[in-house]
Amino acid sequence: MGMSIAGRILVVIHTWSENNEKNYDFSKAVQGKLYRPAKTLQVPIYLDDDVRRKLAGKDKHAPANLTQIVNAILRSQIGVMEMLKQP
């Protein structure tokens, strides 16, 4: 099992002949039969250690709060970019 470039799950069904050679049978295959589009794509973002330490500080709940902190910073930067685009 694997993933295609388009993000589809690929499954290979194989059979064994009497002499143990692999024979792949795609004669009854249906493309996209099990494919379900993802509703949203969660993209992992990896912070450098120094940035993560600065943002998290000494907070015990840093992983949960770190997401909120990074989102707030990104939202403010997006707002600045949108203001700069306006004529």
Image (spheres, grey):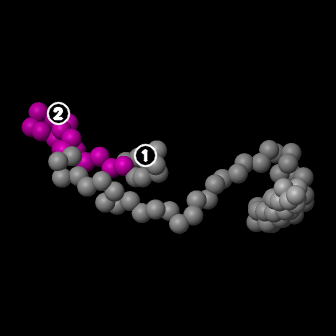
Q: Nearer the viewer, mark 1 or mark 2?
A: 1
Query: Which residue in the protein does label 2 denote?
Result: 21
Q: Residue furthest left?
A: 18
Looking at the rendered image, the quarter that the C terminus falls into is bottom right
Query: Which residue in the protein does label 1 denote?
Result: 4
**Above or below — where is 22 with respect to 74?**
above
Q: Which residue is pictured at 31% across the width and 60% down the height? A: 33
Decide if residue 73 is in sight here. no
Instruction: Look at the numbered disc 2 and give the secondary structure of its residue.
Output: loop
Left or right position of 1 against 55: left
Number of numbered discs on residues: 2
On the image, the x and y values in percent for residue 30 come to 25, 55
On the image, the x and y values in percent for residue 17 come to 12, 39
Q: Which residue is pictured at 34% across the width and 60% down the height? A: 34
Foreground residue, 86 or 40?
Answer: 86
The kind of residue tagged 1 is Ser
On the image, the x and y values in percent for residue 23 come to 18, 38
Q: Which residue is pictured at 50% across the width and 62% down the height? A: 38
**Above or below — where is 23 with respect to 59?**
above
**Above or below — where is 66 with respect to 11?**
below
The kind of residue tagged 2 is Glu
Left or right position of 40 against 47: left
Mark closer to the chain start, 1 or 2:
1
Instruction: Look at the numbered disc 1 and give the secondary structure of its residue.
Output: loop
Mark linked to residue 50: none
Decide if residue 65 is in sight here. yes
The span shown in magenta is 10-25
On the image, the x and y values in percent for residue 82 come to 83, 59
Left or right position of 46 against 7: right
Q: In the rendered structure, does residue 11 fall within the stretch colored magenta?
A: yes
